[in-house]
Image (cartoon, rainbow, N blue to C red):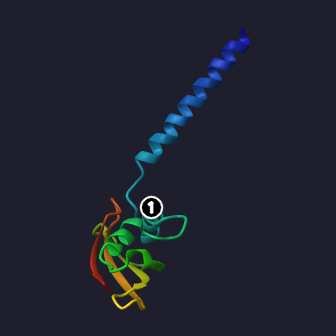
Amino acid sequence: MARAATLILLIAVLISGCTSANTTRTTRAVPRTPDEAVEKCFSGWDGDHRDFKKQVEAQLNDPDSMQVHGTYYNGSEDISDGTMLIRMDYGARNRLGGMVRTDAFAEMNIRTCAVTIIDYGG
C-alpha cells in the first residue's frame, strides 16, 4: 500500500513539473536585449532567420542558388521600440548565370520575429 501511495505521489510530481515547464516556455518575457531577440528568432542550428531568407529567396531569379553567408545584428542597438535591424549577407546567381554576393536589410519585430525587408540586392 505504501508503494502505491509513493508511486501516485511521484506521478503527480512529474505531471506538475511538466505542466509548469510548459507554462514557463509559453509565457516567456519580451526580449530586453538584441542578444535575447536573436536567441529567440534566429536558428540555433545555422544562425539564419528562416522567414527573412524565404522572403529574399522569393525575389531571386534563381532561388535554388541562394547561399547565406551570415545574418548579422548590432548587439548594442536600442530595441525599446520593439524592433531591430538585421542584415543578411548572401549570394545567388543573376540572370546571366554569374554568382553575385550582396546584402539584404530587414526590420525585425522582437516580439513576433516577423521581418519587413527594407532593402535587398536583388
* In the foreground, 96 or 18: 96
Residue at the front extreme of this rendering: 96
Quadrant hosting residue 78 = bottom left
Q: Residues within 10 Å of mark 1 (few under 14, many from 20)?
A: some
Residue 8: x %, y % from top left = 63, 18
* Residue at 50%, 70% in the rendered image: 47
* In the foreground, 53 or 80: 53
Residue 16: x %, y % from top left = 53, 30
* Residue at 33%, 59% in the rendered image: 112
* In the foreground, 27 or 51: 51
Residue 100: x %, y % from top left = 41, 90
Left or right of 1 on screen, residue 106: left
The residue beneath circle 1 is: 40
Quadrant hosting residue 83 = bottom left
Pick the quarter of the image with the N terminus: top right
Q: Is residue 42 above or below residue 18?
A: below
Q: Is residue 114 above or below residue 117?
A: above
